[in-house]
Image: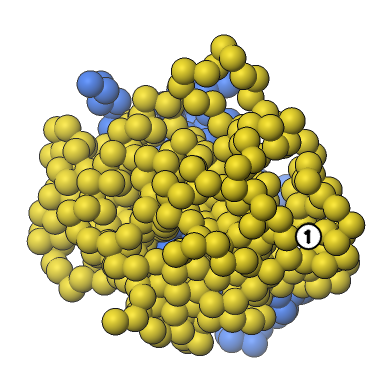
Amino acid sequence: MAALLEIRDLEVDLFTRRGVLRAIDRFSLTVQHGETLGLVGESGCGKSMTSLAIMGLLPVPPAKITGGAILLEGRDLTKLSDSKMQAVRGREVGIIFQDPMSSLNPVYTVGDQLVEAIRCHFKLDRRAAAKRALDLLDRVHIPDARRRLDAYPHELSGGMNQRVVIAMAIACEPKLLIADEPTTALDVTIQAQIIELLKEIQRESRMGMVFITHDLGVIADVADRVTVMYAGKKAEEAPVDVLFDDPRHPYTRGLIGATPKPGDERRHRLVEIPGTVPGLASRPKGCAFANRCPLVFERCHVEAPALVHQAEGHAAACFLADQMEDCDVASVGA
Amino acid sequence: MTHRPPSAFLEFVVRFARNRGAVLGAVIIVLVIALALAAPWLIDKNPLRIVSRPEVWPFTNPRFPLGTDSIGRNIFAMIAYGARTTLMIGIVAALTATAIGVVIGAAAAWFGGWIDDVLTRITELFQTVPNILLIMTVVAILGQKIDNITVAIGITMWPGIARLTRAEFLTLKNREFVLACRSMGMSNIRIMAGEILPNAIPPVIVLASVIIGSSILFESAIAFLGLGDPNVASWGALIGDGRTLIRRSWYICAIPGLAIMLTVLAMNLIGDGLNDALNPKLRDR
C-alpha cells in the first residue's frame, strides 16, 4: 500500500526582485498511516513552507513549487487543479496553525465556525451539522460544550480556542493532520494538555500526523519518527529513540544539547548553537550548517553532503556521520 | 466560567447612544421617516396639484400650514411627499454605491495583480470626474426619471466605498483565519463574502450613512438645476422653483432648504455615532 504522504525531492523557489531563492531544496519525507512524524528545525528553515506546500497554500507569487512531488496515497497533489485541491483541503488533509486566537474568525461564534467547517465537505443540514459540532467539542474535551457553541473566540482562553481549532481541523475526518507548532503560543501547562489531546485523537482515528515544532522535548513526547530540517534541507531522519540516543548530524546534536533535560540542570549549562540559519540569499555552496558547525572542515565549504544511510530508517546529511557514534553529545558545539 | 457579556446588539446601542449628537440625528431621521410614511394620510391628493392662490405665507392659513409656492401648490404637501423622494433616493443610491463599491474593492484586494491595477485605475477615473457633472451627464443620457437619477447618483458615489473596502480587505486577507478557512477547503467566494466581508463591513456602513446624506444633496442639486423628475415632489425642485421669488417670498426656498439641511446633518450625525459604535479602532479610548 502506498504511504499516506510521501514528499519526494520537493523544491520550492521564491521569485523575488533579488532573484530566485531556493527555500526548500530536494526535501523528502514519508508519513505512514497512523504514524506521527516530527518535523524539527529552527525558525526560517522551511518547516511551515513545507506544510503550506502540502496544503497547496503557498503564497504564489513569490513562492512556487519548481520540482518534486507531494504524493497523498499515491496521488500527486502538486498536479491537482485548484478546485480539486479545494476538495482535498480539510477533507483529506487538515492543518492546525500556531496561534489559535488568530486562526478563528472574530465575528462568528465557535459553533457557527464549526458548522461552516463541517459543511465545507459534508452535505448536512444546519441542524445535523450543529449536532456534529457539539460532538466535536465533546471530543476535544471542552467542558460545557453546549454553552460554548455560542461563545465568540475572544470569550475563550487560548487553550480552549486551540481545542476549537483542533475540532475544526478534524471536523471532516482528514487522513492526515498537520500540526504547525500547535503549542508554541500557549502556556506550558496548556501545551501538555493539547499534546495529550492530539495524541489521543490521533490514536483513536488512526490519522497520520506531521507535528512541526522547534521544541525537541515535545518531539520526544509525540513523534514516532523525526525529520530534522535545516535551511530547507533534510539534515537527519531517524526513529525517535534512535535520534535521541545516537544523533549523527552535528545540528541534531546541537539541538539536543540546547534542550534542557531534567536532572542535569545544575551540572551542565545549556549548550547553544552559535550563529543563525543562513538567510535565503546567502545559502552557501557547501553544507548550509558549515558556518555554525564545531566539526567543520574544508570539504564542508565546497560540497554539500548527501544523506548517508546509517541504519534502518536512520540517515544523516554529514560527511562525518559514520564517525559520530561515541562522541559525547554535549561536547559538540561547546 | 466566563460571564456572558451583553449581547453584541445591546452593546452597539449603548455605544451609539453615548454620542448625544447621534441620538439627535436618529430622532430627526425618525421624524422625517414618519412624515414620509404618513404623507398619504395627511394629504390625500397629488402634492403637485395647484390648490390655492400663489404665495400664501406660512402660518396664515390653517389649510396650508407652510403656505403655498409660486404657483399655488401646498408647500407642506410637497415637503411631506418630498421626504419620500429624498429618503428613497438617499437610501437606494447609497445601497447601489455600496454594492458596486464593495464588489469592486473586494475583488481588487482579493485577486491583486493586474485585476487590482485595472479596478483601481477605474476607481480613480471615476474620482477625477466632478460628481455633479457625471450625474448630470448620466441623467441627460438616461432621461429625467427618478430611478435614473438614483442610479446616476449611485454610480457616482461608489469610488469611496471601493477604496475603503479594498483597504480593509487587503489587511484582512493576510490574517491567519483566512488561511485557516482556505485550509478547510472553503472557496474564494465563500471566504470573501462569508468570512472577510463581515469583518470589513463596519467602516463601510459608516461611510454609507454619510453617502446617504451626500446623495440627498446631489438629488436636490439636480432638481434645483431643473434636471429632476417633473412628476415627483422634491425638496430640491421646490427650491429651484422658488428661487425667482427669493426677495419677496423667501420662505419658499427656506423651508425645503431647512428640511434638506436637517436631514443631511442628521445623516452625518448618525454616521458619527455609527463610527463610535462600529469602528473597533476607536473603541475603549
- Point out the image quarter for the C terminus of chain B: top right
Q: Is residue A20 left or right of residue A82?
A: right
Q: Is residue B138 visible?
A: no
> Drawn colour of chain B?
blue
Mark 1 sits on what residue? A287
Q: Is residue A220 left or right of residue A167?
A: right
- Residue nearest the observer in this picture, B60 or A329: A329
The chain under label 1 reads A
- State the residue at coordinates (60%, 74%): A10
From the top left corner, tell me how far across and down residue A319 is, in percent. Answer: 73, 60
Q: Is residue A204 left or right of residue A278?
A: left
- Residue nearest the observer in this picture, B182 or B12: B182
- Residue nearest the observer in this picture, A7 or B104: A7
Question: Dot 1: within a 10 Å radius of its alpha carbon, few (fewer than 14), some, or many (20 or more) residues?
Answer: many
In the picture, residue B108 is in which quadrant?
bottom right
From the top left corner, tell me how far across and down residue A12 is, in percent. Answer: 66, 72
- State the residue at coordinates (52%, 23%): B284
Q: State whether residue B208 is above or below residue A119.
A: above
From the top left corner, tell me how far across and down residue A94 is, in percent. Answer: 36, 62
Tell me the kind of residue under disc 1. Cys
Tell me, by letter, which chain the rendering colours yellow.
A
In the picture, residue B101 is in which quadrant?
bottom right
Q: At numbered mark 1, what does the secondary structure look like: helix, strand or loop?
A: loop
- State the residue at coordinates (68%, 47%): A250
- State the residue at coordinates (77%, 57%): A288
- Point out the image quarter for the N terminus of chain B: top left
From the top left corner, tell me how far across and down residue A175 is, in percent. Answer: 29, 67
Q: Count how many numbered circles sit on residues in the image.
A: 1
- Residue nearest the observer in this picture, A276 or B170: A276
